[in-house]
Image (tube, grey):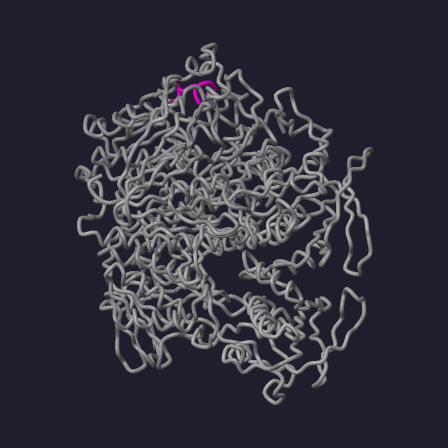
Amino acid sequence: MADNFEPLIVTFCCNWCSYAGADNAGVGRRQMPPNFRIIRTMCSARIDPEFILRALSKGADGVMVLGCHPADCHYIGGNYRARRRIALIRLVLEQYGFDPKRLLLQWVSASEGEKFQKTVVDFVDTIKALGPTPIKSKKQKDMLTNAVAIKEE
Amino acid sequence: MTTKSALVIGGGIAGIQASLDLADRNIHVYLVDRLPTIGGTMCMLDKTFPTNDCSACILSPKMADAAGHPNITLMTYTEVEKIEGEAGNFTVTLKKKARYVDEESCTACGDCVAKCPTRGIPDQFNYGLTTRRAIYIPHAQAVPRKALIDPTQCKMILDGKCGVCAKTCGKNAIHYDDADKTETIEVGSVIAACGFSVWDAKAATEYGYGRIANVVTAIEYERLEGAAGPFDGHIPVPSTIVKDKWGVPDKHNEATKGPKSVAWIQCCGSRSHKKKWRQYCSSVCCMYATKQAMITKEHGDVDEDIFFMDIRSYGKEFEAYIIRGETEYGIHMHRGARVSNLEEDPVTKQVIVNYTDKDNNGVSKTFDMVVLSIGLEAPEGAEEFAKVLGIELNQYGFAKTTVFNPLETTRPGIYVTGAFAAPKDIPTSVAEASGAAAKAGANIVNDPSWEPCKPKQYPAEKDVSGKEPRIGVWVCHCGINIGSVVNVPEVAKYAESLPHVVVSKETKYACAQDTLNEISQFITDYDLNRVVVASCTPRTHEPLFREACRNGGLNMYLYNMANIRDQCSWIHMHSPEAATEKAKDLLRMAIAKACLLEPLEGAEIPVTQAAAVIGGGITGMTTALDIAAQKIPVHIFEREDHLGGFATNFTHAEDGKLVSEFLAETIKKIENCPYITVHLNAKVKEIPGYVGNFRVVLEDGTETPVGAVEFAVGAAQYKPVEYNYGSDAKVKTYVELEKEINAGKFQGKNVVFIQCVGSRNEKVGYCSRVCCAASIRNAIAIKKKDPTANVTIIHKDIRTYGFREDMYYEASSLGVRFLRRCNDNELPAYDGNFVEAYDTTLGEKVKIPVDTLALAVGIAPMREEKEKLAVMVKVPISKDGFYFEAHQKLRPVDFATEGVFVAGAAHWPKFMDECIAQGSGAASRMLTIITKDHLVSEGITASVSNPNNCNGCGTCVGCCEYNAISIVIGPDGNPVSSVNAGLCKGCGCCVAACPSGAMEQRGFRNAQIIAEIDALLDPVMEKE
């Protein structure tokens, strides 16, 4: 693998804790690698397994799902549901030939700028160690994309 | 202001809650704080007990709500100088202190702070653990987040030699000639939520605070521990902290070590008659010390000891928390241990704790750090401020209140809430804050000249249906915050190349008024139907830009934001190229989503302007009277044939007045009130409906429509099976004993009280809170009448928290003997004539003769009764059998089910004053609903967008935490899911769960989120 591999990571954050934690990292000027892009949802329970598969199928090298700590969920128990869904989708990922380490679930509270930073730094390292996504050809991409085609279409 | 307002003094959590409650009822509020930011003490805390919630996470949204509320005028850095007039008509003189920074123009970019050469000034927010500069932003979560200049330090203001910050400021916001301004306002009511100060630990010379480096106070420890504190949550041993020449600690210095052992010393400044110490109990320290110990343990393996006299975990689920601390976290609890002094090891700088253990042996133990659990006292300057308010203080300097009027000061129209009346925890303060709001609101709305705040009028929203997206983009430099890292002109130019983008502009400050006006104007000029701003975070700035859209006639949900500052330029400062690429990606994603945004409207839900109070005890009656005081009909449903509830058993007096007399007066008020209907012998059968629209259906079939419901069903007394109660005439409950005493019939000579009968044992884990004070009250009465009587109280801990500590002291002074039973679940043995107990002072078992054995029976939750009601509105019951509120800290009387509330002993065992305050609190929360003729639901809700795909499987029903979804029969006769927009909170959990793609979340539709993913990974780069 080329030494200059710079992974692209899709990060899902919930509005109340982890997105605020990312902001907190910013307010604290905590430096971290620029390899991730955040997509905000109101709750980690909104994250459809399809989004994760879609991101990986389109060539993301890794996906992070960051939610509120257990018992801190703004919507009572959404993060528990996210936790279960992520556990299941890990099994699916393996079947498609992805290392389940490419998907990370972590809890980050609104005040945990440092934890956000550490999570990003560690995950970028993990993905760098794993190398680029195994999805290479356009054909492979299309196959997986079709397999997880948007439900409403 | 043409109409009457309310004034709330103090912007801590209590003041914020009181303001929000009033403002939500369209009453205009001036929220005044003498500090430059609201948030009070709570925003200094790291975590909160007993949930270990992050304090910032739960408080920040409330602070933002208060700052953004159209009916709240926030006046920070402002002092109240004079209050003239009377209830309903006060004229208040305020002094707005000079900030030297224009609040309107300041964007809190921080450029001025970074350049200010005057450094090394102790940072009050961090209790001097770090330093700030002469111009500063109080802290990261400050509201308003605006800079200010400390005029006692600024070289420009002192001698005209500097001016760097004014040169740095891109907004010309700095004015060295700023001056204090005086303003007068007219208000109908005043709420004093002035909070508390912490006790000055220097007075405890034996503990060496200020002299021994590694002795800190608990509030300092909160900052040391805080994730947003000066050490990022890595607790340092103070003697190993390395500071630069400006006094700013180097948080990454290798010499700085974390503690391996920490001790907490309780009652520092409390429960003592020593000079400068306070005689009362500060009520919160046992819990916060345990919390700090637990959180510390989570940071690393630390050996922890807490030294205390009694552990006072009397609140909801507090006892279980302490037990968890001891058993699960391994905190060493030293009960009955008073620390004589602390010494410093001159070599290791460790702290030696010298104490007497429970067997009266002198022991020393060494720790890396010692935390002093300092008490709470009346806020600094309370004595002078009481004169401004024209109210009386009690002997300890707190606002004077009474048991029957816990929220009223001695001056009519001025109410008190939070720790300004007595040391108290956050949930109690929040419930009382609502209560004070209920009282304050009545003075205002009953003024015939009062008019509710009118909603702001906006231009008509343009119709965007079926139109191609026309997007306007603004990319913000944020002074140099974004622009010095991200190539903003390049990003703005890039946006122009993207499909549907009609105009793309760079701006120095997107949030400045000129840009906001431009956004509104361009919606017309360029016929925009979407707006995207690339700047900071939607968490703080989305409301501002949404407002600009509304002002321009665009539905506010047609706005989207790319966070290129907090989540880009600030965290990738050393990679400007990569940061620029990231900013482009984020903007492209935001634009892709914006193309698919739809205009949203919150659904209008009609409201029945009436309330149901279930339970006619003191709590329920208080709620009813407070609601009726605003001329809104209330129905009390009482299952017995009379009002009064458990208090009808009380024969004692409070504040010199018999409870029975107060009860009779209250019942009379209820009976004479034209707005209250009492339904006696009322058995509630079901409560169908939802917020604003409930029906209370009784077993006899009668139905009452109401907009909000309160459960004030109280609790019962535990029926003892211990000590042959019922067959041995010597054995009685404290209520029975009290009746005898107050009837003058009691003749006992040898009285033993047994505490915690039916509480704090293997079956009932919790503390019943009221029994210690009740036994002591009776013990005092017996001793006062007959000083020769032998009165013994056998207890586990004495929990006379707050000013009730005076009773404990009085009882001890009168010769009541207190014996602590061994800390196990076994009750003392009793053979019909003698009680056998262990005397810790003697160190041996003693036999005490008994002619009266008074059982301090606990409070039983009446779980079955509660469950019956709970299932009707789907509210939870805690493991102890009491109702479980929406949030233990900040929503103490709300249920997660909107429109349903809880107060009094139904929530948790509590004293009468606490029931009254909480009853008022629930009234206020209910008034925020039933004073409106309709409610508007959240726009971002779930909805069954594709009903043809729905087969009514019910997966969504099971995963909704708010019971907002039900399966109904659709027009084609098939089952289909249906979302009640009034109940939906918009988390989107059901959308992800839906197996058929039928469910959608407005504002976060599947296609919208997928558009973001695709825009990042598979972009269409060119305009067609």
Rendered location of residue B232, percent (x, y): 60, 35
Reply yes or no: does residue B196 show up in magenta. no
Q: Nearer the viewer, residue B368 or B467?
A: B368
Picture layout, residue B665 above or below residue B211: below
Does residue B44 show up?
yes
Q: How many labels does the image show?
A: 0
Residue B993 found in image quarter: bottom left
Q: Which residues lie in the magenta part?
A: B482-491
Rendered location of residue B689, percent (x, y): 30, 66
Q: Nearer the viewer, residue B607 or B979?
A: B607
Residue B866 found in image quarter: bottom left
Q: Which of B694 and B202 is in front in this view?
A: B202
Q: Which of B147 and B354 is in front in this view?
A: B354
Name the residue located 29 percent from the left edge and 67 percent from the top edge.
Answer: B694
Q: Is the magenta stretch mostly helix, strand or loop?
A: loop
Rendered location of residue B675, percent (x, y): 24, 67
Rendered location of residue B996, percent (x, y): 38, 57
Quarter placement of the C terminus of chain B:
top left
Picture layout, residue B382 above or below residue A31: below
Horizontal side of residue B743 vs B497, given as left or right: right
Horizontal side of residue B787 vs A19, given as left or right: right
Does residue B1024 show up?
no
Horizontal side of residue B1021 vs B348, given as left or right: left
Picture layout, residue A52 above or below residue B565: below
Reply yes or no: does residue B487 show up in magenta. yes
Quarter placement of the N terminus of chain B:
top left
Name the residue located 24 percent from the left edge and 45 percent from the top edge.
Answer: B4
Name the residue located 41 percent from the left edge and 47 percent from the top edge.
Answer: A149
Q: Residue furthest top?
A: B161
